[in-house]
Amino acid sequence: MSATASRRGPTPPSAIAERGPKGARLGDRLLAWLGVRLALWMVVVGALVPAAIEAPHRVTAHYDEHYFFAHDDAARVTMVDFHQLPAWNPYYCGGIPLAANPQDEALSPDAILRVAFGTALGRHLAIILFIVLGLEGTFRLARRHGASAIASAVAAVGFAASGRFYFMIEFGWINMFGFQLLPWVVLGFEEGAGRGAWRWRVLGGAFLAWMLLAAGTYTVPYTVLVLGALALWDTLEALLAKRTDPRAPASLLHPLLSFATVGVVAVVLSAAKLFPMLRVILEHPRLTASHEAFSLFQLLESILLTHTMKRPPIGGDAYIGGAFLVLAVLGCVLRDRAAARWLAMALAFLGLAFGDQGPRAAYTLLHKLPLYGQLRNPERFTLVVAFFLALGSASALTALEDAPITLIRAVRARWRSFRRRDPSAPLPLVAALLGGATGAALGAGVGLVVARSLVQENQVRGIFSADPPLAYATDFRQSRGNRWDAHVWARVGRGTLQCFEENRFPQSDRLRADLPAEEYPLDPSRARVERVSWSPNRIALHVVATDSTPVVVNQNFDRGWTADAGEVLSSGGLLAVVAPPGDRTIVLTYRDGWLTLGVAVSLLGAIACAVALARWLRARAYGARARWDDARRRG
Amino acid sequence: MSATRRIARLAAWLVGLAPLEETRPVLALSWGGAIAAACFGAFVFFRVTSALWATPRPAPVPPDDPATSARFGLTASDRREIFRELAAAEPGERASAERRFAGQAWSIDDDRASGEREAVLGVAARRKLNVTVVYLVLDEGIRNKWPGPDGKPLAAAVAPLNPRAQ
C-alpha cells in the first residue's frame, strides 16, 4: 500500500479489489476525468428529470411544493428586494420565524441559485445540482472501496436515481434532496479516519452542514445514524483485527474521532440555522403521528416492484429494483468485505423502516432519543437502504468486469506452468487489451441495462403542470390567503393567514384580511398611525398620540420584535407597541439573537474553511509545478 | 521512440500493465485532457439544460389603471363576476368541512380552503387566467367586503393554526 493510501484512512475492505487487475482498467482511465463524469451525470439528469428542465418557471400541483416554494420565495423577496437576513416571514400564518423554521432552506448554499435565477428556476437548478452531487459522491465512495469506475458509475445511478427522490420532486421536497449529499458525508468520515486526514473530516462536516442548512429535518438525523453505525462497525472491525493480530495498524479511536470532527465542523458551519432552529423546536415541537408500522412485504414491495406492478405505494415510492439487490447479495457471496459491510448496513436500516412494531422495536427505541422523537414516516429509511444496496452492487459488477482478465490470467498461468515457465510473468499487451476491452464491454453492458431500467422507471415527466406564480407590485397586506396555493402570495405582497406548519407556531385569532391599514391604534381616539416604510424585518410608523396607547400591527407577536420607542407587547397575540404621547416615528425591528450569533459563528467557520481550502489549493499548485519541473529535468 | 512503441506504451498504460513516465508531453497531455474533458462536461451541461435558459419568465400581473378602474388586467365587472363565482361556492365548502371535521376549527377552515382552491382552479381554467390573478380578485373582494351569496361579506379571518388536533 502506498504512503498516500496509509494516510487516507483504513484500507478499504474489498477483496474483489485485491483479486482484480493490479493496475487500472480501461473504464477507470476514461472516467478518471471529472469532465467526462460530469457529461455522463448530465446525460443521467436529462433522462431522469426532463420535467424539471422542460418547465423551469412552473410548479407542480402538489400543495407541499407550494408550501416550500412559498418559504423559498419569502426568503428571496427578503434578501433580494429588501436586502435583509431572512429572519421573519410576514407572508405566512400572519408572521412566523423564517430561517429558524426547521422546514425553511433560506440559508442553504443552494439558496444562491434561487437568489441568482429566481425561485422557480433556482429550485429546478437545485434539483439538478443535488442529483449531480449524489452521482459524483456515490461514484467516489464506491471507487474508494475498490469498485471499478464503470461499477461505481452504475452504483451512483442506483442511489441518485432511486425512487424515493422522484416523488419528492412532485411534493417539492427539495430539502430532502440533501440526501444526495449522504455519500459525501460518508466519504469525508471514512477518508477522515486516516491519520492527519483532517481535510476530509472538514469536507464531511461541510456537507452535513449543507444538509442542515437545507432544512435537513430528516436528512441530518438519518445521516448521523449512518455515521454512527459505520463508526461502530469500523471500531468493532479494528477491535477484532487487534485481537487477532496485536500488531495490526488500525486505531480504535480513529473512526470515532472522525465522526466527532465531522459533527463539530457541521455544527459550526450550520450554526446560522442550527442555533435559532433549536429554539423553535424546543418551544414549538413538531407534530408527530402516534403509530406508524410497515410489514416486510410492504417495504420490499416499495423497493423492488415497479410502479405498474405495485399497489398504491406507502408514503411514496422507493423503487431501486431487484437487480441492485441481487448484485449486492452476489458481492457478499463473492466474499467481498465491502459488499458485506454495505449489505449489513442496508439490513440494519431496513430494520428501522419497519417502524413501531412494539416497545422493543429499533424505531420505537430510536423515538425515545432527543429530537428523533419528532420524526415521522419510518418508511423513509428505505432511502438509506437504497444507498447501501447501490454501493453493495458495485462489488459484484466489478467482479464481472474483471472476470475476462482474471480468466485469461488463470488460463495463461496454467498453460505456462504446464510448459514449465514462470506462471507469474506479466500478460502480453494484446491479451491484456482483449481482456480489458471485453471486461469493460461486459461491465458497461450489464451496468447500462440495470441503470437504464432504473432511470426509465423513475423518470419524472410532465409534473410541473400548475401555473407559475406572477409578480404584482403593491404594498404589503395580509390576505385570507390559501395554504393549498401558498406559492402565489409573497410575490404579490400578500401574506396568507390560512396556513399549515409542522411546528405549532402561535397564530393570533385577531389577524384580519379586511383592514383599511395593516397598522392601527387600538384606541383610534387616542392616536393616528401611518406607515412610513415596510420591510419583513423592519416597520417604520408615524404615530401621533395624544396619550400612551398601543399601536397594533396585523402580524403575530414574537419576542424578537423590538421598538426604538415604547414597549413591545402582545395584544391578543398580535404585535403591538405602546406608543408614547407625541408626534414621532416608531421603528419596529425583528432581531433573532440566536440567528445573529449563528450567522457570526458560521461565517467564522466558513472563513477558516476557505483559508484551509486556499492553502490546500496552493499546495496542489506547488505540487503540479514541482511535477512539471521534474519532468523537464528528465527531458 | 517510434510511434508504434509510443502507442504500445499508451495501450499498456490504458490497461494498467505499465505506468507512464511523467515526461512533459505526458503531463501536458494529461492536463490538457482534463481541461478538454471539463469543457466537454460544461458543453453537455448547457446542452441538456438548454430549455432552462431559453424559456421566458412569466410576465407580471398588469399594473392597475385608475382611469378605467382596471385591476390585475381585468375590468371591475369581470372582477365582481369572478368574486361572485368564488363566493357562491363558499357556504357549501364550509358546510361540508363542518360535517367532516366537527368541532375542529382549524381543520374546518383548512378543508374549506381546499374546496376554495378547487373553485379557484375552475375559474382560472374557464377564464384562461393565472391562479394568482383569481386569488388577487378574491382578496380584493374580501378586503372591500363585497357581499357573498347571503348578502354578507366573506369571513376575513381564519382559525388559528392547530393541525392534527386529534
Image: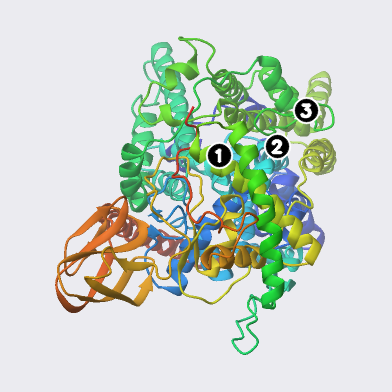
Would you call the spot at circle 3 few (<14 residues within 10 Å), some (14-19), or many (20 or more)? Answer: many
The quadrant in which residue A333 appears is top right
Q: Give the chain letter at badge 2.
A: A
Judge if badges 3 and 1 mark residues of a common chain: no
Q: Amino acid at mark 2?
A: Gly
Q: Amino acid at mark 3?
A: Ala
Q: Residue A141 or A127: which is nearer the viewer?
A: A127
Measuring 52% from the left and 44% from the top, which residue is drawn there? A184
Question: With respect to residue A125, does A319 lie above or below?
Answer: above
Residue that badge 3 annotates:
A323
Question: Left or right: where does residue A492 sit relative to residue B114?
Answer: left
The quadrant in which residue A561 appears is bottom left
Q: Give the chain letter at badge 3.
A: A
Q: Residue A326 or A291: which is nearer the viewer?
A: A291
Residue B166 position, x and y percent, is 49, 27
Residue that badge 1 annotates:
B108
